[in-house]
Amino acid sequence: MSASLHAIFKRIRAEGYKLTRPRRVVIEVLAGGETHMGASEIVAAVRQKAPDVGRASVYRALELLTRLGVVQVSAMGRATTVYMLTPACCHHHLVCVECRRTVELNECALRDLEKSLASRFGFQVQGHLVEIYGRCEACQDNPGSAPL
């Protein structure tokens, strides 16, 4: 097991929750699968790893993991939300509103703002997610297309 998974499991226990099989498998799926997965994709992947884990258990696990800050939820310009493990620092996306292409950004220019807001409001920041919407270069070059 990787150090990051171990840290996630430890955090769940530290918050007073049991590390149930559904919770463990959901975390493993998110850690080993696509970067961003919809709930139905997660259910399917969990069922491949653990056929006895039901849909309701996956949804309950996602709800708890999101509440604990282990998982982040994002729209990323889609009709349905996607889930991802919360990165240690921050996570940013550029999302094309036309073709839905998503560019992941790992650099962060918001650290000073994050510190300032934390100090100003007495808030303990655990991370942040930024999504910037617009039109990618390919969609800008296509004059016949219009944003969604």
Image (cartoon, rainbow, N blue to C red):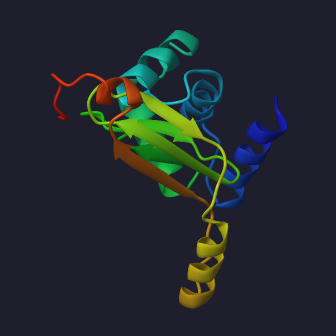
Depicted 146 relative to depicted 131: above or below = above
Residue 85 x %, y %: 59, 40
Which image quadrant is residue 79 in?
top left
Q: Toward the viewer: 4 or 56? A: 4
x 52%, y 10%: residue: 48
Query: Where's residue 73, x and y in %?
Result: 43, 45
The answer to whether residue 88 is left or right of residue 34 is right
| Residue at 77% in and 47% down | 7
Give the quadrant of the N terminus. Answer: top right
Residue 63 at x, y = what percent?
42, 47
Residue at 39 percent across and 38 percent down: it is 95
Question: Which picture quadrant has residue 144?
Answer: top left
Q: Position of residue 129 (x, y in %)?
A: 51, 53
- Whether residue 134 is visible to the viewer of this picture, yes or no, is yes
Q: Quadrant of residue 25?
A: top right
Numbered marks: total: 0
